[in-house]
Amino acid sequence: MPGPKNLDPSSSPRALLGAELRYARERAGLSQEELAQPLFVSGSFIGQLEAGTRRMHLEYARQIDEILGTGGFFERNCAAAAKSKYPDHFAAAAEAEADAETIKEYAPLLIPGLLQTEAYARAVCRAYQPTAADEIIERLVATRMERAQLLDDPTTPLLWTVLDEAVLRRVVGDAGVTAEALRHVAALGRRHRAIVQVLPFKAGAHASLDGALKLMTFPDAPPLAYVYGLGTGQLLDDPASVARHRLTYDLLGASALSPQESLALIESVAEDYVHDEHL
């Protein structure tokens, strides 16, 4: 039986590497849980690698080669699968997002990247990197807009976002930029492309005061939770952790305004910004 070939980095390397991992694991007669045990990871982690929703890091690639007797194949091809246009702390989550069937996100401070307009994204990137060259900012904006193309499909993924009221009240760029961004979010809700709720200030203390949260499900891989903050992020696949964060999201939704009330509030705040812009 011929051995696996080196992967072509131009043809979905994560997916190809995952397919080769499944092939090599099954040839070795191991279950996902059996391969996971010496790596000190979960069986669902192996499932995510095989589905291409997680990147294979070099330390795992080396151990997998040793366990499966693949002659350094995974170590050699790991670099191609690990290449990403996103920051290290976000790369795995962004790549998983592209394969997700459902995405649920709580945003405490900013409109999430998938829902941002170009002008809003540019203002955010410039705020993060005030001394960066314009071409660097434009590259970041282009990458963010490319991510948003996920929503060009009329049905997949199912996107459900809970915005803290602080997101609406924070002027990003200027009043006109913020008004445009809020109207864009409301338009996605009105077109039934996204479910949008607002968690009002009057809700008081809530289940995710510590920060932002993203939940993702997949048609052929276990669900993931992503928790993140300033320059940091953690992608979680442990079933207990994912279940705990799912409950957190459910509690946020229960405390938030209904989708219709939320869209009305978003549009009202956007109109206030338009009025301010023309004063």
Image (spheres, rainbow, N blue to C red):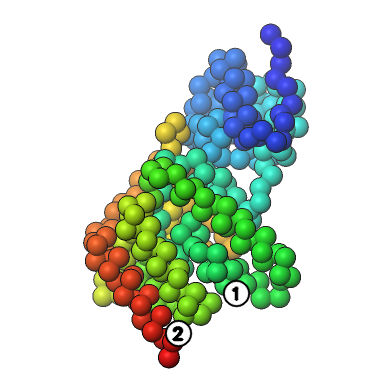
Percent across and percent down for residue 217 are 41, 41
Q: Residues within 10 Å of mark 1 (few under 14, many from 20)?
A: few
Q: Secondary structure at mark 1?
A: helix
Determine which residue is flagged by label 1.
127
> Of 273 and 218, which appears nearest the observer?
273
What's the mark number on residue 277? 2
The kind of residue tagged 2 is Glu
Sequence order check: which comes first, mark 1 or mark 2?
Answer: 1
Q: Secondary structure at mark 2?
A: helix
Please tell me which residue is depicted at 66% across the width and 51% down the height of the picture.
85
> Of 190 and 171, which appears nearest the observer?
190
Q: Is residue 234 above or below residue 224?
A: below
Please tell me which residue is depicted at 34% across the width and 49% down the height of the picture.
246
Please tell me which residue is depicted at 64% across the width and 61% down the height of the picture.
140
Q: Is residue 243 above or below residue 191?
A: above
Percent across and percent down for residue 28 are 60, 16
Please tell me which residue is depicted at 24% across the width and 62% down the height of the picture.
260
Percent across and percent down for residue 3 are 71, 16
The kind of residue tagged 1 is Ala
Residue most extreme to the front: 278
State the image quarter where residue 35 is shown.
Answer: top right
Is any part of residue 225 visible from this angle?
no
